[in-house]
Amino acid sequence: MTSKPQVYPYIPNSVPAVKAAMLAATGAASVEEFYADVPTELRMDRPLNLPAPLLSEARLKRHVQAILARNRHCGEVLSFLGGGCYQHHVPAICDEINGRSEFLTAYAGEPYDDHGRFQALWEYCSMMGELLNLDVVSVPTYDGMQAAATACCMAARHSGRRLVLLAANTSADKRSHIKTYGRSEIDFVEVAFDPITGLLDRGDLRAKLSQEVAALYLDVPNYFGGIDEGQAIAGLVKSAGAMLIVGVDPLSLGVLTPPGDYGADIVCGDIQSLGMHMSYGGGHGGFIASRDEEALLMQYPSRLFGIAPTSVPGQYGFGDVAYQRTSFDKREQGNEFVGTAAALWGITAGVFLASQGPQGMVELGEGIMKRVAYARQRLSTLPGLRLAHPGAVHFKEFVLDFSATGKTVAEVNAGLRERAIFGGHDLSEAFPALGQSALYAFTEVHSQADIDALVDALREVLAS
């Protein structure tokens, strides 16, 4: 007996007549024949594990609402999650301005008379340049991981070398993204980190530097929140004729030295911390920055905005610089094919930076470091719990080691969830050398009472 085919209302090619018409248009007699060029070992030999279709729109809506109702967002509970997407205070002015009709649909393309958005993005780039103390800043890329991957490709093109070193104390997701994106033109080698300090192992760096290395990629602060000594690392990298690429949290630059000041050639990062809600992991934009050196500037694949006088005395215009570099002009001959940008988030970050000003950025950075110091002091008193990297200075995040407590991070986090607290990221799989460790984040939204509540909750969970 032949089973009745399942038709999904929102998947057109699940309708038998539509599927037959598509096969006829391609000249294939069956789906198997259509996919004949795909090797058998790469093909799934069973149906997708999809639930039965909900044919009623009302029932589908109820089903989706029931799934969404299971979510608990960070506004409902106390959260210490970080690892790349952070709970920061978003000033109301950021939402007000990025919701205006002039900006809300800001995307990659635009009408020629869209001068307001050009100026807004130029202002964003200018403020980022001041924060980074660098001359050239790109309009936002898709996210910080994309910016890091592109920065590595820029260094390889600029130097003519294929080998890029990646600091192993970078996020596992970011390292994976960089390797996937750059695999066609770059060979990657990881540089170990010291498990005692969480900082880059300089001995391993020295051993792996050579005249074939294009660049070292390093995050400051690193994934564990530790702050490497950038100047010393820059000296080692430069001695091999390589470039230094530093990923940075822009919110840290109110208290930390900008990477360009200690020798970074390319600086990149994510602007989510500059006025963007977490949006379930969706509110991201990346930046790339460097000195104004023509040979390096021509390696940027993304758009660069500048200012120029117009034919009307005293008036200025805003638009693309060296447009001929881009895939918009050269198409497949461009440095890289640039697709989705995050222009709206660039405008939002510009609003945030303008609202904070230099002093505001200093106060934000200092406030975060004070919270981190207080949290480290309080948490280190809990029996069996230890700071994974006690000797390093940290910004926003640090690692807690639960190995001696007799509980796994998964068990601890389950206990915290019962108490309406999101614990830290479980690092036991991505960084097994750290044992049962978790990454905890502290930002300006956390009060002293919040940190005390975490300490009390952990004491209960560990004693249970």
Image (cartoon, helix red, strand yellow):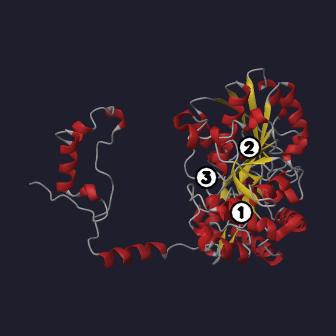
Q: Amino acid at mark 3?
A: Tyr
Front residue of 117 and 140: 117
Q: Residues within 10 Å of mark 3 (few under 14, many from 20)?
A: many
**Residue 56 in the image, given as x and y percentages of width and height:** 27, 75
Q: Residues within 10 Å of mark 1 (few under 14, many from 20)?
A: many
**Residue 191 in the image, given as x and y percentages of width and height:** 74, 34
Q: Is residue 164 visible?
A: no
Q: Which residue is mark 1?
A: 120
Using the numbered discs, state the Cα–Cα distance from disc 3 to disc 2 in whole angstroms: 23 Å
Farthest residue, direction left: 1
Nearer-N-terminus badge (3/2): 3
Q: Which residue is mark 2?
A: 169
| Left or right position of 194 against 31 | right
**Residue 40 in the image, given as x and y percentages of width and height:** 31, 33
Q: Residues within 10 Å of mark 2 (few under 14, many from 20)?
A: many
Using the numbered discs, state the Cα–Cα distance from disc 2 to disc 1 in whole angstroms: 35 Å
Residue 207 quadrant: top right
Farthest residue, direction front: 312
Disc number for residue 8: none
Nearer-N-terminus badge (2/1): 1
Q: Amino acid at mark 1?
A: Ala
Q: Which residue is mark 3?
A: 142
**Image position of 416 with respect to 406: above or below:** below
Using the numbered discs, state the Cα–Cα distance from disc 3 to disc 1 in whole angstroms: 18 Å
